[in-house]
Image: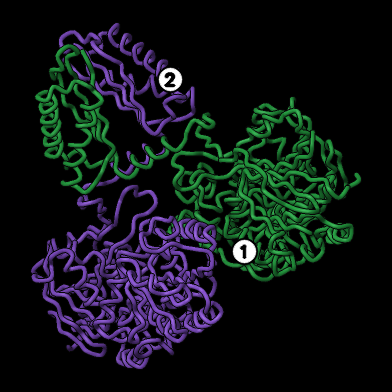
Chain colours: A green, B purple
Amino acid sequence: MKTTGNQSVKIIPLGGLEQIGMNITAFEYEDSIIVVDCGLAFPDDEMLGIDLVIPDITYLKENASKVKGLVITHGHEDHIGAIPYALKELNMPIYATKLTMGLIENKLKEHNLLRTTRRKVIKHGQSINLGRFRIEFIKTNHSISDAAALAIYTPAGIIVHTGDFKIDYTPVFGDAIDLGRFAELGKKGVLALMCESTNVEREGYTPSERTVGRTLRHLFDENKDHRIIVATFASNVDRVQQIIDCAYSCGKKVVIEGRSMVSTISTAAELGYIKIPDNTLIDIEQMKNYVDEQLVLITTGSQGETMAALSRMAASTHRKVSIKPGDVIIFSSHPIPGNEKAVSKVMNELAKKGASVIFQDTHVSGHACQEEIKLIYTLTKPRYAIPIHGEYRHLKRHKDLAVEMGIPKENVMILQSGDVLTISKEQAKVTGHVPAQGILVDGLGVGDVGNIVLRDRQHLSQNGLFIVVVTLDRYNGVLLAGPDIVSRGFVYVRESEKLMEEAKSVVTNTLEHCNAKKITDWGRIKGAIRDDLGDYIWKKMKRSPMILPIIMEV
Amino acid sequence: MKTTGNQSVKIIPLGGLEQIGMNITAFEYEDSIIVVDCGLAFPDDEMLGIDLVIPDITYLKENASKVKGLVITHGHEDHIGAIPYALKELNMPIYATKLTMGLIENKLKEHNLLRTTRRKVIKHGQSINLGRFRIEFIKTNHSISDAAALAIYTPAGIIVHTGDFKIDYTPVFGDAIDLGRFAELGKKGVLALMCESTNVEREGYTPSERTVGRTLRHLFDENKDHRIIVATFASNVDRVQQIIDCAYSCGKKVVIEGRSMVSTISTAAELGYIKIPDNTLIDIEQMKNYVDEQLVLITTGSQGETMAALSRMAASTHRKVSIKPGDVIIFSSHPIPGNEKAVSKVMNELAKKGASVIFQDTHVSGHACQEEIKLIYTLTKPRYAIPIHGEYRHLKRHKDLAVEMGIPKENVMILQSGDVLTISKEQAKVTGHVPAQGILVDGLGVGDVGNIVLRDRQHLSQNGLFIVVVTLDRYNGVLLAGPDIVSRGFVYVRESEKLMEEAKSVVTNTLEHCNAKKITDWGRIKGAIRDDLGDYIWKKMKRSPMILPIIMEV
């Protein structure tokens, strides 16, 4: 693909720039659009009752004829989790490395999309042509195997997208990141580097995954005579490999537990990304044939998720595994921000059952720290830097780092999701905006819960609810029945009899006032009930429950 | 006080052993009870709408005549916050060091309890006799000045209670912890050591508060030309002292902002715990008379609390301070577990406004790490160890550490709040239980929100609400009006018209069925509505809102 000096392409992030999660970016040139990643985000604390958040792909749907394909960097939920939702709106062929594709296919099967979705497995080093773009997959390291960075050859120049990565000189599976290729691209000339920002606030290097293996080996040696339970991320296949290796070398049998763990490890094993020695893996049903010290469980639940296997063990609601004194439980993970208390709760419950809980030095990150990011800048020597994957403060810190690395300040582009960046050798500039707010998924509903609904849930959760029902004569507004008051989430019923009686007389008074003033508009009557009752409860209790007046007419 | 071999005393923790917070312990011998600390806890995530949690002092009220006084170790909320609530139930004299008492008095004033509460300020090294107990206050270091450990002389022997502490050889204010006194007590013979456990999972030592001062000094030097805003804990008077010193040496003026910050620093200044150079402090109203680079703000909000000053500045709702590009904002704090996301949100908002946000190496803990705890064990050589202040996993880790220090396993007592530990030189044993569940405070209501109410709030917050109202003829059960359906927190109204219509016909069907089957019990009719409508919504949406059928009779 020839590049001429004055061509410009558009880079349109549709997510991932206000948060860590929901990564998706479109690249557009004339009649061609390619999409990189299509991830979900987990809901914030204030998104009550929401299951997950997916990107808004309105822009892609509006330009459906241009969309040439979806290119995926690796198989984590924040990069592949929204694919089924997107495909239901817009059919696109998918390009990914082998393990990544295996994990995507598991999702497509669940959503009945496997048959209708074109897919192509790409090897590291291989390139594909999609419309006016050529995309080359470059080997990287991450906390899931088969991660790729992308070199996107565009008419305006080469854009390097790192995906999520770290530099691991001694990876557990496969090769180290292909730094040589980054260097070659640097020699050719890189227009823009889109580098991830997760760990940009951390100095130094992220240690090799193998360092965790060494710690685990020590822990297994020290606890030979105990049943060992290791909780980790289902997707960290290399970690699971190391746990299995430790178990094997101690002569222990391994049980894999937790739905996502079983599914990921099966896929990884089928595709050759994990090697399980013969006679090592046993089914959970076979556990009873072994004594405790012969057993290792590898389980989900390292983030304290209520329904995950380890949490159910801790709460004594797991049907197959009971925690007992002597059990050694290793959290091979760090809590993701926001999960600290949930994790701590599970640890306390496990400790109360007599288990030893170990969580120190048993995890390394999958993301590059400052020195690694600097190395990528040094190798690729980009003209522009576009920090990606992070909250604003990460992008900002990344900008400072890029400037330290010699990128001119004005060439570091901090974007927001929805920005249309038009970029050429001469300039880079935000030239438009497209919809990019996350869409909330609650049960089967996609996008039907919005701010009003969330505000109501918030209000109900903080203060509960007061329902006032009155039946009025439809002709003269005379009170035929009620006021009846039902409250929920407000106060114990037995504590509140007097309060309820007083509340009823407040409402009766309000109705009499309205009647005396000849107010017949039911909206106004409801408003008056809400105001008077609200004042009464605030004065009495300093609380503001949601008040719902309902008028029935007979 | 003579101790004879076979006397036993009771130690009754009424809080603080399942969590970090709500510290309160009673010590009882014959006709005497003393209470150490009376703190509150902040609500867990699942305690929706709860403001704070206070201890249950039923046992103290039932033994009111025995209670000789309340002895306070230091002025943090988790040690003094529940005092006003307790005093309203049970009048007790209070004993504390000067700054601690000053902070308590602020609370008593707010609750109109100052006049009716006897108070005595105690100096470090001083002892008081309360009934059959003698209590000696021992100088310690902590993240608030004037912290004390207690030596409690009982007929069964000396019990040492550390309060919250660290070992700071170079404190900012006053002396280092009185290690010599701990050693003397060790020589005399200590029956039991009640040592705090907050940092027991951390190896090594907590650095001196002064190390933060050095970092701050560098940051102030580097940012001479900027307005500097420092967020920290209102109660960390020594930290504020160091910030003021830095500001003074740069020739900057200081504004103190945030209600609790202003109140604590005023008290500390009045009592001589902080030295503010003349002409350094200015009122927030005077800020306009200075250029940015002359100004330092010290503010609350380091934990991302929505209503705190810094959060309001970040959200552009602070009436006096607008964040602007060039501002340097230092978080001199770590997020308390559970606050990580809130803190991060505020940092992002500040960064978006162009401020530089600094949060690394700008805080040290106020709690002892493993080596410090070991030192206290070595000095006091207790017969029994009773780990306090921590979640179960902290207490468990503390037990392991005590055993490492040579305390026999059976002499390390992990208690639960409410346990009555009967302890003598011969044995220590849990001999009873008293009520000790936290009491929830919501607005003016103390204890009127319990599990049922919280479960309802949880249900409402996750799934919202469906109210079904029907008016029936009181004589023949004929439907006179409705079914009317009101939903909140469920789905956008405009999205749900069809759903609402269908829901109504589901309810109409149910009522017809009930009528056909001659069901006249309204409880059963409501149950049928709940079941049928619940099934319908689950099938349609995979959600389970709270369904509230209301039957009006006319």
**In the shown orientation, is residue A176 left or right of residue A22?**
right
**In the shown orientation, is residue A327 left or right of residue B294?**
right
Q: CA distance from mark 1 to mark 2?
A: 48 Å
Quadrant position of residue B29: bottom left
Who's the residue at 19% across and 23% down the image? Answer: A470
Q: Amino acid at mark 2?
A: Glu
Front position among marks 1 and 2: 1
Instruction: Please say if A225 is above or below B28.
Output: above
- Residue B411 visible in the picture: no
Who's the residue at 61% across and 49% down the image? Answer: A416
On the image, the x and y values in percent for residue B460 come to 36, 37
On the image, the x and y values in percent for residue A511 come to 14, 27
Instruction: Please say if A68 is above or below A354.
Output: above
Residue, far top? B516
- Residue B249 visible in the picture: yes
Quadrant position of residue B33: bottom left
Q: Which residue is mark 1?
A: A397
Q: Which residue is mark 2?
A: B497
**In the shown orientation, is residue A390 left or right of residue B379?**
right
